[in-house]
Amino acid sequence: MKTSASSRHFADHAGSVAPVLSLIDITKKFPGVVALNKVSFDVRPGEVHALLGENGAGKSTLMKVLAGKHQPNGGKIILEGEEKSFENPKQAKKSGIVLIHQEQSLVPEMSVAENIYLGSLPLKWGNRVDWKKLHADSTEILQRLKCSFTSRDMVSHLSIAKKQMVEIARALVFTPKVVVFDEPTASLTDHEKPVLYEIIKTLQEQGVGIVYISHRMDEIFHLSQRITVLRDGEYNGTVNTVETNEDEVTKLMIGRSLELDYASKPHDFKENMLELRHLTVDGVFEDVSFNVRKGEIVGMYGLVGAGRSEVAETVFGLRRPSAGEILLEGRAQTILSSHEAVEKGIALVPEDRKDQGLILGMNCRDNMTLSALGSVSSMGFMKTSAEKVVHDKYQSAMKIKTPSWRQKVGNLSGGNQQKIVIGKWLHTHPKLLILDEPTRGIDVGSKAEIHALIKELARSGYAVLVISSEMPEVLGVSNRIIAMYDGRITAEFDGDAVSEDELVQAITGQVTKAPRAAAVTTDDAAAP
Amino acid sequence: MVNNMIDVKGFLKGGGFIQPIWVFVIVITVFFSFMSDYFLSVGNLTNILVQTSTIGLIALGMTYVMINGNIDLSVGAILGLAASLSVGLQDYGLAVAVIAALASGLIIGAINGLIVWKTGVNAFIVTLGAMIGVRGLIFVYTEEQSFYATNFAFSDFGAATIGPFPLLAIIFLVCALVMHLVLKKTGHGRNTFAVGGNAEAALDAGIRIGRHMTINFIIVGFFAALAGVLLATQMGAATPNLGRDYELWTITAVVLGGTKLTGGYGSITGTLGGVLAIGILRNGMNMMQVPAFYVLVILGVILISVLIIDQKLNVHASKGVSI
Amino acid sequence: MATAEQGNNRLMFGGVSKSGLLSFLSAQGILIFFLLSMVVFSFFSEQFLSQSNIMTVVRQASIIGIIAVGVTVVIIGGNLDLSVGSMLSFATVLVVDLHDKVGPTTAIILMFALTLLVGAINGFLVGFMRLNSLIVTLAMLSAIQGGILIYSGGQNVDIANQDSTWFSVFGRGYVAGIAVPVVIFAVLAIIVQIVMSYTSYGRRIFAVGGNPVAAVYSGIRKNWCVFSTYLISAFCVACAALVLGSRVMGSQNNVGQGYELLVLAGIILGGTSLLGGAGSIWKTVIGVLILGFIQNGLLLMGYPYYTQWLVTWVIIILAVWLDLANKRKRLLTTHS
């Protein structure tokens, strides 16, 4: 895919400092795929350079080449004027290039210090670990990062955010020249983000070049000096952050500008589909009450860990409520398993599509029919033709891009995988559709398609509950928004008449009591 | 509430306190000492140590392999091969026989390790193959014959004592101490944990996964061979079927000791407790004249109970949905 | 996003036509190995390919084969069953001992019931208690062995009037010229293969083995699925015990010792991955037959029986290695 020269944006290089790191014409081929085609990229000392692109655009591959995990088929890596080639991550690290992983790459049952110095423990004669030096050095690094835990703490006892800190601490073992952050805020709460920003600032002041990969525009515009965009494995331009705006960057990423469709929300609500009364799971969430009506989209907004997914899992029969009631169409229910939930017309598109949503080794068709095998079998025997009809129906309805139903879903892109999960659930003909982070890690194009689909479903009578930690998503699709904080519902808002500030306050614990008066209460079931 | 559970778990896991298997060891020790006056005598206790030393030695190595995230099913066969070699080669001199026997363990361990490392085939399959194949080697070598030791120094060694302590028990305890220190204090020990706990991260950090894995297979091979030689000294003989089912006993002991099959977690102290628990049960029940096969049932039940308790503690401590 | 798809397109449309034959060959590697080894053995021994010899081999392999059919289902479901050897001892001792006490029909019914009960215990512990199957079935291996010894008091059991009971038909009889053990093996293999490939139950087992979490999130009753695989495994063991008990007309307490390993060896050789979610009964049948023919071929060539163990060692590792290398190549091809 070629981009015309006119659409490229080049940042002004005149008068700038020499880059600490340059990647020149990097090409990386996997058998059958050109993942990177002559991509160039550089970072100057003390600069935050954001790397943007849709999923599959090649960001991660480029960074893996940089960090020595992949070896390029062509092109040069120049670090401080010297050409380098890294055979493994350790070499790259020794040269001062550190990749901070998106996934947790820590060893749980080891101390913080051992994790920081993983692979380079200080040793005395006889292969013995020099504990004194290890803890002294680790403590020094932790102090620099203002961490609240000690080097002797066990990593498995730390919170996700603290684990992220350990990962960052690990980057500081060797004096880094370039640090790559790959979606560092994905697992951080809003409280913890400023600490990360602070660390990035400190690194900048020390003259370290920062590569920052993120899907979140606000972060990128807050932090970066330059933005480089990749598309389909090709370089698609670099812009100075101050000279651009989100719209322009989005256009660079997807080749068109994206207009969030705030209109066209459904508005024809009928009777209650789901009602929760004081639902509690001990130690997880407490006193959760709300309702979802047929034809309505309710957004559940809150930070990761606020108990949102857990509420969904309880409704779906995966957790036992310790108190409270679940009512479906006005009747109290005990849902003891996911199987019962499906039989009662509940569908849950789970948060983690790779671990919870799909059997990656199975093909598209088999995944699509998995939740409603009864509908494509008779007397227990599969009717393969009926299965194929189901697959083709949802493939065309949802524009799923797959070469054939035989394709293993593990080989599809995130967006298409998510559509298969949604298709799987639509085929069960549910009455209540719960979507947990339906567009996490999905490219902008598929995101818009999924949002449109959600609204379409509600209009056709589904009761929809959308769980999300992305404000534009919640605002864009919901009729009503329920805010959760620390296992409790803190507020309930009208989806069209709520300010962003109110929402943020509600999910960060600044509102302690639920202002039920402001909300659409459960008694208003029959809306106009 | 959740915090309480973690504390209980931490306590049971032995966060500075005592490992659950040792609680069990103490309980059954007290129980049997009430049932039999002879049970707590020095003679009997050292007897238990000698009896457990065979499985105990293998379990020391197995702990490393399992913490590393692997498993070795071939230890029983290695034990049998080493026992046969140490007796069968005595015509060439005792030293030659013993060295050859120990070397056979090292070599088969190395073969296992290298295959797992270089081919990436699951250790379960590789060592299952070796378990069958090495047993074949024993039969090829012995032609299905049992060997009897002609050299008295050999069989005397099995019964030797230092002061009141049997030599075999001392060897076992010294080995356990060394293995404990190596696991806790050395780079190899720590990296073994790292590889088992998160192989991907260990690889990225530049830890040579394959090397550590192979070393651990060599270690367990060596200990299996050592156990074989020592068992042969006790019996003054070696049979071609010696060591059958020992892999099962060993894995049982290690799992009882709290080492996780998934890797990344475990200890030599726990394994020692597991080995002793089995030894004490066998000895104590024998003393109460319970037929030996009841021990099999009881061990099975205990093993499953340990799994259930461990799982209950873990499920309560984590907030996740248990699937 | 697009790169991955394009890559797959290329793979789908370019790869197949170019190396169709090659990929077919490498996918059928174990079958080719099987045929090759048959040819080699037939050079060394004229008897080897004779009809009677082939029937003998298949008959001898049928006990392991019958058990392997069941264990394959357990493995596809993502678990292991190491207790089948002990269960075989248990079931054989039971049916032989009860034969003279309560008559063959009742003995068989009781044996099936009790073996299924043991399978249900396995299934309950792994399926519903969600314990690690390796350790559970290891513990069961030892517990069942102890149970047999308690039951029999360590005595071997046998059937008094071996010639006058119809019970002998399972191990010694023939149907249309084919030995009954072979018939049982074939019928079980065909039925289970059909169940796994063409029914919704089979699809669920594959899903549970492929990704248990996703299976639960898809509304599949995972616990029941796992539980049921152990019942199938126990049923197969009971069938094998019928054949074994009837053939020998007696039983030692540890007659099944080590069968779990031979069964696993056959399954692994056939190419079913121990990770779950993949595999087939056909592969297992071929794997078991390979083991049988190697054993037989080596014996005919004059080697003692234990040389087959050495050969098994080598081919297990080679087979799995080749299979893995093959998969890795495919994995690389689809990497984005």
Image (cartoon, helix red, strand yellow):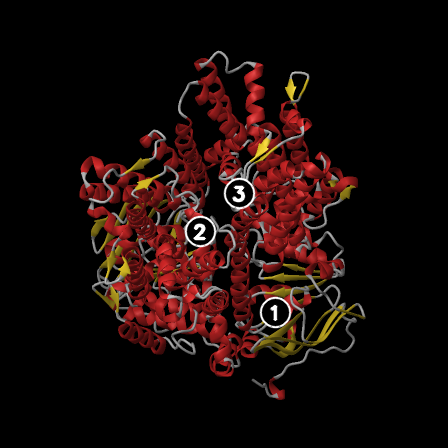
CB under 8 Å between callouts 1 and 3?
no
Residue furthest toward the top? B37
Nearer the camera: disc 1 or disc 3: 3
Residue A52 drawn at (x, y percent): 59, 71
Nearer the camera: disc 3 or disc 2: 3
Mark 1 residue crowding within 10 angstroms, few (<14) / some (14–19) / many (20+): some
Task: Name the mark on residue B144.
Answer: 3
Which residue is located at x 69 percent, y 58 percent? A201
Report, in whole angstroms, how far the alpha carbon at label 1 lies from the one at label 3: 58 Å
- According to the image, label 1 marks what residue? A61
Task: Name the mark on residue C262.
Answer: 2
Judging from the image, mark 3 belongs to the subunit labelled: B
Residue C74 drawn at (x, y percent): 37, 53
Q: Which of C92 and B60 is in front in this view?
A: C92
Q: In this view, does B40 lie to the left or right of C88?
A: right
- Per the image, label 1 sits on a secondary structure element best described as helix
Residue A101 drawn at (x, y percent): 61, 58
Q: Nearer the viewer, residue B145 or A174?
A: B145
Of the residues shown, which amino acid type is indicated by label 3?
Glu
Mark 3 residue crowding within 10 angstroms, few (<14) / some (14–19) / many (20+): some
Q: Nearer the viewer, residue A417 or C279?
A: C279
Nearer the camera: disc 2 or disc 1: 2
Of the residues shown, which amino acid type is indicated by label 1?
Thr
* Residue B115 to residue A31: above or below: above
Q: In which quarter of the image is residue A399?
A: bottom left
* Residue B106 to residue A390: above or below: above
Task: Name the mark on residue C54.
Answer: none
Which residue is located at x 45 percent, y 49 percent? C261
